[in-house]
Amino acid sequence: MITDRFRSLGFLLKDVSRRYTRRFEERAQRLSLTLPQCRALVHLQSNEGVSQKRLAELADVDPMTLVRILDRMEADGWMQRRFDPSDRRAHTLWLTPASAPVLEQIWQLLTETRTEMLRGLSSEEREMLLTLLERVHANLTALAPLSSEADSGTDAGRRSTRSDR
């Protein structure tokens, strides 16, 4: 039998994520950066040479929003677009040396926020939390998409059917 604590696990995970994100964004305002801008820079740091499309996927940012982010980063001298040698219509993305101090500041903000979030947890508890979250993430990543037939059986689908009666 599921205990009441487990019934709201999804809500708790969402609330933790929302509060962590809000706290990070408060700090990022010091740099005049948004969370999507920080995500794009951090993902580009470990994936230099990627396409704009791939960076949008990695950073979980809408492709049109990413174009604006990249335009700003390029204007600030933090990155550059280069023609893809295998597809002249596409660009690859590369950081410039000017991005290093900004990335260092972003990593510092992430460290400060993470430290606050994990305050009061022992090293063993932190390791266990990370291990368990990685396993849950792997479980969710491995799931096949629900079929459209399964989607039609959702509460929303049943509600609309009932209201049509």
Image (cartoon, rainbow, N blue to C red):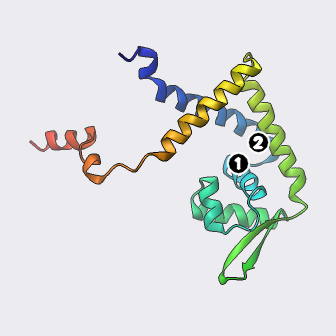
Residue under the image location 66 percent in, 25 percent down: 128
Instruction: Tell me the number on the disc at residue 6.
Output: none
**On the picture, is 113 further left or further right than 151?**
right
- At mark 1, the secondary structure is loop
Residue under the image location 25 percent in, 51 percent down: 149
Q: Please say if 88 is above or below 40.
A: below
Looking at this view, is 35 or 100 the one in front? 100
Q: Quadrant of residue 133?
A: top right
**Where is mark 2, residue-wise?**
28
Tag 2 near tag 1, CB within 8 Å: yes
Q: Tag 1: residue type?
A: Thr
- At mark 2, the secondary structure is helix
Give the quarter of the figure containing the C terminus: top left
Kindly give the residue lying farthest to the bottom in the view shown. 88
**Where is mark 1, residue-wise?**
34
Residue under the image location 71 percent in, 53 percent down: 37
Q: Quadrant of residue 4?
A: top left
**Distance (Cα) linking label 2 and label 1:** 6 Å
Label located before the other in sequence (2 or 1): 2
**What percent of the width, then of the height, locates residue 42?**
75, 52
Q: Tag 2: residue type?
A: Ala
